[in-house]
Every structure is written in structure tokens, then in C-alpha cells.
Amino acid sequence: MSEAAWERPVLVLNAGSSSLKYQLVVPETGEVRSRGLVERIGETGSEVADHSVALQQVAERLRTEGIDLDAFSLRAVGHRVVHGGPDFSEPVVIDDEVLDRIRELSALAPLHNPAAAIGIEAARKRFAVPHVAVFDTAFFSSLPPEASTYAVPRDLAAKHAIRRYGFHGTSHQYVAQATADLLGRPVEDLRQVVLHLGNGCSASAVRGGRAVDTSMGLTPLEGLVMGTRSGDVDPGLHAYLGREAGLSLEEIDTLLNKQSGVLGLSGVNDFRELEHRLATGDPDARLAFDVVVHRLKHYVGAYLAILGGIDALVFTAGVGENSISVRAAVTDGLEGLGIEVDRARNAARSTQARVISPAGATVAVAVVPTNEELAIARQTAEIVR
Ligand code: ADP
């Protein structure tokens, strides 16, 4: 072996039902050797019949880039798994039993876990290295009972594993640590509110590096207003829509997950497009933006109260890292709480983690790029060491 173990990359896989995202990354340095996406898996007319074929394509693409995964160079494969249910509170090496359990958790994540299981199965056949599952829910397994419990009958909740699980955990955990690094303070000393604003959006309250509350719940539908998801609605809405609009539970689920949020309010789900329309004075875009921001403030205020004050307010993911107007609007009027952004700092474009609050502000407002693949690669390397 010519390469030292620490230089060997981890292959990070994120399998969706019809897609496979991959990244070949060296955990210690963050060096990305390759990345890409195979799409239209299993769709009619597609060359990619299933996830095994997709993996074969990944291996071939890498070979054309001069990387032979079948040589000794691969250290391990890290798999992103959306739902770890009540069982998994940290990454695990995948064996048959773990894979079965991930499959069984499909009831809790019908759109995500079956795909992850298929991806894992194919990858284990293809690559004879350790495979590790990293769960999107794991970071939130530390939520105190008062935050994770829904006020529904306890026996029913126990029978069906109903609780608030939270999602985007890998991102929230990574960003909370990266913020501490940015501020040059131990994560143990910080109370943070992290806003992960991408297509999916979630907020978390983090004390001393541990999550104490988060906006997503049993499913990734709860909480903030998202690209196509409503976030919080009156739980009575389901029964009302059933009675008044004649919709089935399935239809209501689709409505709230796929046709609501920014899309339902404005007709577009991409935030760049929303900002573009905002600039033309489109009233629907205006309302959508204001609803998004109002909900964000609602959660920032809630977590401020839960944490008893904060040291850092952090923006991450596509919208959080790039939208100057969202960051300005969310923090607008919070000066009395010690939260404000410096106009020029907020407007400066950068791909680096940065503080955007004025010098000497009580609360550090920061923009910290997330990197879920690197976080998965690091956790994978850690556990197979
Ligand atoms: P995902 O949740 O799929 O990982 P991302 O974190 O990539 O999503 O975020 C996607 C969102 O970020 C989209 O709504 C996109 O419009 C938004 N976004 C990306 N770049 C910008 C930008 N420069 N300004 C505003 N929004 C942006």
C-alpha cells in the first residue's frame, strides 16, 4: 500500500428512490476527490435499471477520472440514512441486522428509508469494505423528553414510536461545531440557534453542542415553511380538509409535502426565483417571503426562551448561506435582544464561514456553510478506525 490510511478516501452515498448522490472525500483534509449524481434510476427508458447499475456507473465514472475503487484505495462507505427511529442515536457499522432495522423503519420514512436500504444493499455487494450508516435523526436523540414528546396518549405513542425525531441532524451538528471553531470558543460554552434553510428547512436549539430542541418532528414536515412543505399547520386541518374538500389522507399528505410552502403561496419553490419575483413587486412572492420570515422569527424567539438567551445565531444551507434578504429580514427588529447584522458584512459574498454581526455584538450572527458529506465521511472514518 502506497497511500497512508489517513489519505484514503471514504465514499459517501446518499441514495434516493430514483437518484444516487456520491462524493469521494478524504475525511481528515476535506479534500473531495470526486462527486456526482446518478439520476433517473429505475425510470422507464432510463439506462440505469437499479441502484446496482447506478453504482457500477459511479465506479466507471471514477475510473475515467483515474480513480480505481477496486484497488485498495477505498477506506469505507458512509451511507446517509434519513430515519434512525428510536434505535439509532449514533452512526453504526452496517451488518445484516442493522440493514433489516433500517428497512423496518420505512414506516416512519416511507419516501427515504426504502431507498437508503436498497442503496446499502447494492453497495455492500459492490464494495468489500466496512459500510457505515449515518442517521439524519441521530443528533436529536438527545432531545429532552419535554421537547421530543407529543401530547397524545402515551400508550399509542409507545406502540407506534410517535415522538419528535428531528432531521438534518448531521448538518446541525456539523454547523454547531464549525461555528464554535469560527468563534474560537469551545462548543461546550455556547448556546446556539442553527437555521438550516435549503429546500427542506429546520431550526435547532443547541446547548453545549447538544440539541435541546428542533423544528422537525415525527416527519420532516413539521416546523418552518419550506420550498414545497407547509411546515406547522393546525393539526385540525387534516380533518377539516377531509370533511370540506373531500381529500383522502394520502392526498392531504401529498398536498402538505409537495404542493405547499413557498410553492403553494407563490407558484415557485426555488428561493432564487422567489427573490427574483419579489424584485418585480409580485404580491404573492411578497406574502410567501413574509410568511417564511415570520415563521423563522417565531422559532428563533422560541429557542431564545428555551435556551435562556443565545451566544450565536447561525444560518446555513442554500438559502441560509446565500440569501442576504432572508438573513436581514429574520434579524430585523431584534436589536433589543442583542441580535443584529452589519449591513455590509451581511451583503459580502463568500463561501467561507463568517460572522455578520457588528463587532462587539452580544450575539454572534454567523453564516456557516454546511457540509453533510464531509460530516458523514468523518463519522464513518471515526467508527471504522
Ligand atoms: P437541499 O435541501 O436540496 O440540500 P440546498 O441547501 O442546496 O437544498 O438549498 C436549495 C435552496 O437554496 C433553493 O431554494 C435555492 O434557490 C436556494 N439558493 C441557492 N443559491 C441561492 C442564492 N444565491 N440566493 C438565494 N437562494 C439561493
Image: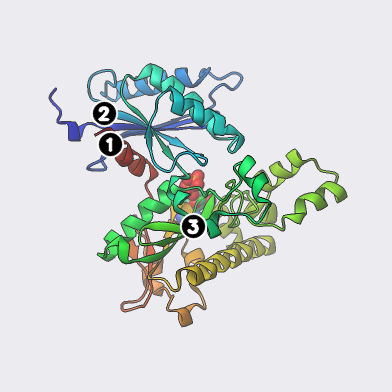
| Residue 297 percent location from the top left of the image | 55, 68
Neighbour class for label 3 at 10 Å: few (<14), some, many (≥20)?
few
2 or 1: tag closer to the N-terminus: 2
**Between tags 1 and 3, which lies in front?**
3
* Figure quadrant of the N terminus: top left
Q: What's the residue type where badge 2 is placed?
A: Arg
Q: Which residue does the numbered mark 1 point to in the structure image?
A: 381
Q: Closer to the camera, 86 or 254?
A: 86
Q: Secondary structure at mark 2?
A: loop
- Vertical placement of residue 113 versus 158, above or below: above
Q: Is residue 363 visible?
A: yes
Q: Secondary structure at mark 3?
A: loop
Q: Closer to the camera, 94 or 156?
A: 156
The residue drawn where x is 27% and y is 39% is 382
Q: Which residue does the numbered mark 2 point to in the structure image?
A: 75
In this picture, residue 5 sits left or right of residue 74? left
Name which quarter of the figure residue 322 lies in: bottom left
1 or 3: tag closer to the N-terminus: 3
Q: What's the residue type where badge 3 is placed?
A: Pro
Neighbour class for label 2 at 10 Å: few (<14), some, many (≥20)?
many
* Figure quadrant of the C terminus: top left
The tag on residue 144 is 3
| Residue 95 percent location from the top left of the image | 40, 24
The residue drawn where x is 52% and y is 17% is 47
Quote the CA–CA distance across marks 1 and 3.
29 Å
Task: Please tell me how many numbered marks the rendered image carries.
Answer: 3
Name which quarter of the figure residue 108 lies in: top right
